[in-house]
Image (cartoon, rainbow, N blue to C red):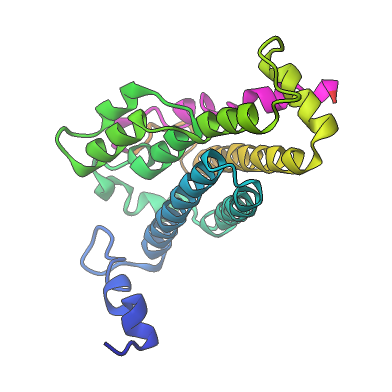
C-alpha cells in the first residue's frame, strides 16, 4: 500500500472526531475537545515511553533509559505549555455547553491513572470509577499488577551499584552516595526528578485552570471539583529523591 500524508496519519478519521455535544460544534467547545483529545494522545505516548524506561532499567541499559527519560521530560513540558491555550476559555463560554457534558469528568481519564500506576503510585480504589467489565477497567487492572518505574529503578540500583548500594544502608543513604560517586546514574535520577516536578506543575496548572473557569462550583460528573484537585497537589512520585536534597 502506498501512503499519502493524509492516509498514513488517518487524517479524515482523526479530524472527524472533534464532534462535541451538539450537532454543530462552536469554537469554544472545539477548543475544549481538541485540548483534551490531544492531551490523551500525549498520555498515550508518555505511558509507552515510561514503560520503555522501565524495561531499559530492568535490562541494565542506563544510556537507553536516560535517553527515553529525556523524551518523557519534554512530553510533560508540552502538556504544561498546552494549558496556556485552554486558559483562553472564559467561564461564560464554558457554561454554554457545560451541562451537556453529562457525567463525564477529567477524573475518568484512565490514561492519567495509568501514568500514576506505571510510575508507582497505585490506588486500587480508583478502579471503582470505571464500569466492570470495561476496557478502561481491564487496562488499569493489568497496570495495577504490573511492575513500575520505581520497582525497576530500585532493581537497577541494586544490581548496578553494588559497591555503594549495600543492604546495611537505607535507600536514601545509598541514593546520596550514588549522587556523589556515580554521575551517569545521577543524571538519570535528576531526569526522574524533572518528570516528577513537571507532573506536579501540570497538576497545579490544572487546579488553577479549573479555579479560573468554574471557581468553587461542583465539578463535572458530580465530582468535588476544585476541592478534589487541590488534595492531589504536591504529592511526588519519587519522594526519596526529594527528601535527600538537603543532604547533597
Residue 224 counted in the magenta span? yes
Relative vertical location of residue 117 with respect to residue 77 in this rendering, above or below: above
Task: Tell me the quarter of the image containing the C terminus.
Answer: top right
The image position of residue 26, as x and y in percent, is 35, 67
Residue at image location 69% in from the left, 26% down from the top? 162
Left/right of residue 7 with respect to residue 121 in the rendered view: left
Please indicate whether residue 164 sits to the left or right of residue 219 in the image: right
What residue lies at 77% left-to-right and 30% top-to-bottom?
178
Instruction: Say above or below: 207 vs 145.
Output: below
- Asked whether residue 203 appears in the rendered view, the answer is yes
Dividing the picture into quarters, in which one does residue 88 lie?
bottom right
Q: Residue furthest left?
A: 133
Left or right: where 27 falls relative to 233: left
Number of numbered discs present?
0
Q: Nearer the viewer, residue 162 or 228?
A: 162
| Residue 155 drawn at (x, y percent) | 56, 29
Magenta part of the protein: which range?
221-247
User: Residue 201 vs residue 9: left or right?
Assistant: right
Residue lying at 59% horizontally and 57% vertically, measured from the top left:
78
The reply to whether residue 237 is visible in this rendering is no
Foreground residue, 136 or 153?
A: 153
Q: Using the image, determine if residue 183 lies above or below residue 159.
A: below
* Occupied quadrant, residue 85: bottom right
Instruction: Return the x and y of residue 240 as percentages of the image width and height.
Output: 66, 22
Give the quadrant of residue 28: bottom left
Q: How far across and down, in percent of the image, does residue 127 sit? A: 28, 29
Q: Is residue 192 magenta?
A: no
Q: In this orientation, which residue lies closer to the viewer: 85 or 54? A: 54
Amino acid at each position: 500500500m502506498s501512503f499519502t500524508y493524509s492516509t498514513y496519519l488517518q487524517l479524515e478519521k482523526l479530524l472527524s472526531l472533534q464532534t462535541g455535544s451538539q450537532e454543530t460544534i462552536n469554537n469554544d467547545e472545539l477548543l475544549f475537545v481538541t485540548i483534551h483529545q490531544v492531551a490523551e494522545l500525549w498520555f498515550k505516548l508518555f505511558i509507552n515511553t515510561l514503560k520503555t524506561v522501565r524495561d531499559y532499567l530492568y535490562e541494565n541499559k542506563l544510556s537507553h533509559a536516560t535517553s527515553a527519560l529525556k523524551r518523557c521530560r519534554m512530553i510533560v513540558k508540552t502538556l504544561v505549555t498546552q494549558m496556556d491555550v485552554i486558559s483562553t476559555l472564559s467561564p461564560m463560554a464554558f457554561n454554554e455547553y457545560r451541562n451537556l457534558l453529562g457525567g463525564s469528568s477529567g477524573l475518568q481519564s484512565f490514561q492519567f491513572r495509568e501514568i500514576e500506576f506505571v510510575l508507582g503510585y497505585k490506588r486500587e480504589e480508583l478502579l471503582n470509577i470505571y464500569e466492570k467489565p470495561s476496557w478502561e477497567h481491564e487496562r488499569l487492572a493489568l497496570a495495577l499488577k504490573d511492575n513500575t518505574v520505581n520497582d525497576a529503578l530500585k532493581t537497577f540500583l541494586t544490581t548496578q551499584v553494588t559497591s555503594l548500594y549495600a543492604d546495611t544502608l537505607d535507600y536514601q543513604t545509598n541514593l546520596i552516595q550514588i549522587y556523589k560517586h556515580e554521575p551517569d546514574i545521577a543524571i538519570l535520577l535528576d531526569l526522574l526528578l524533572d518528570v516528577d516536578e513537571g507532573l506536579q506543575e501540570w497538576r497545579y496548572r490544572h487546579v488553577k485552570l479549573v479555579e479560573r473557569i468554574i471557581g468553587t462550583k461542583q465539578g463535572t460528573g458530580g465530582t468535588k471539583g476544585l476541592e478534589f484537585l487541590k488534595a492531589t497537589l504536591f504529592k511526588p512520585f519519587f519522594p526519596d529523591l526529594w527528601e535527600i536534597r538537603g543532604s547533597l
